[in-house]
Image (tube, helix red, strand yellow):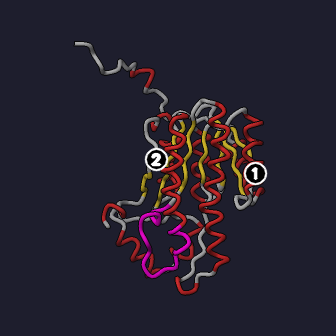
Amino acid sequence: MERITPTIDFATELTGIFDMRDKVVFMPGGYGGIGEAIAWALALAGAHVTVGGRDAGKAEELAGALVEHGLAADGIPLDVESVPSIREAVDGIAERHGRIDVLVNCVGIQREEPLLEVSEEAYDEVYRVNLKGAMFLAQAVAKHQTAGSKGGRQVHLLSVRAQLGLRDRGYSAYCSTKGALVMLIKQHAMELARNGITVNGVAPTFVYTEMIRHVIENPEFRKQLLERIPLGRIANPKDVVGPVMFFCSDASAFVTGQIMYVDGGITASQ
């Protein structure tokens, strides 16, 4: 009987499946607490990382730190609330490097307002950054990835709030935009699959970053949060790095349209 199991040269084909050497990576929002850890990991794995954000100084500062370590990186200004700004940034990266292999979208904001006090201005701002920004970042990068005919990776950072509401806190804008981003990822995965481009998401629970300082410094809420997390601790930014690296690398070549919850077991326990 003819063998149907592929012959795999394990010694060579499984070496470096997480290797990012010479990959061109665009990281909008990459200078935040989680994004910084991811940027270092990707650069250490051999990628050329371009960090973009509204604060060009922070983007350039992170890129400079990577370069000082002998890694390949640069920082650029980017306003994700402006589609022209997104397109200009993406086109510039593609022009400099000839392609964009990977998008890691780390952009996200929260404007906490109780339901009865949600303002149109705050809700619209969260929508423009978290959802509309993701849409047009993905589109701009996909145009270059499809034109290059070499496949690619797109990874979006979400949150467990894409699946779970948060009791007694004003998360209407945040939860609804992150939940919608799940479906955007699935749709983009279906449209780009024929081009060999995978689209996935990584959804952490609360992570020790400045973004959640006001929450973590509330002793009562912190105690409740720790009691709800089966692993019994709040995430560190490096906890998010592995899942993102998986989706960026060849290790996930047959995975698309998926959300990985990095949550210490919260979503498994609800």
Mark number, residue 60: 1
Residue 85 lies left or right of residue 175; in this view the side is right
Q: In the rendered view, tell whether residue 125 sits above or below residue 118.
A: above
Question: 54 or 226, which is in the foreground?
Answer: 54
The image shows residue 220, relative to residue 88, as above or below, that is below
Magenta residue span:
159-176
Q: Position of residue 224 (x, y in %)?
A: 39, 76
The amino acid sitting under disc 1 is: Glu
Residue 171 in magenta? yes
Q: Quadrant of residue 166?
A: bottom left
- Give the x, y percent position of residue 213: 56, 72
Residue 99's spot in the image, x, y percent?
A: 68, 34
Q: Which numbered mark, 2 or 1, is in the foreground of this view?
A: 2
Residue 241 colored magenta? no
Label 2: which secondary element: loop
Q: Position of residue 34 (x, y in %)?
A: 57, 56
Say which of 49 and 3 sits in front: 3
Q: Is residue 218 above or below residue 155?
A: below
Three-letter code for the amino acid on which mark 2 is drawn: Gly
Which residue is depicted at the point 66% across and 33% down? 147
Horizontal placement of 51 versus 130: left or right? Answer: right
Going by the image, does 193 lie left or right of 120?
Answer: left
Q: Would you place residue 117 above or below residue 227 in this image? A: below
For residue 257, the mark is 2
Q: Residue drawn 75% across and 51% down?
A: 60
> Which of 48/218 is in front?
48
Residue at the extreme bottom: 116
Q: Tag 1's secondary structure?
A: helix
Quadrant the C terminus occupies: bottom left
Q: Residues within 10 Å of mark 2 (few under 14, many from 20)?
A: some
Circle 1 Cα neighbour tier, 10 Å, few/some/many (<14 / 14–19 / ≥20): many
* Image-quadrant location for residue 6: top left
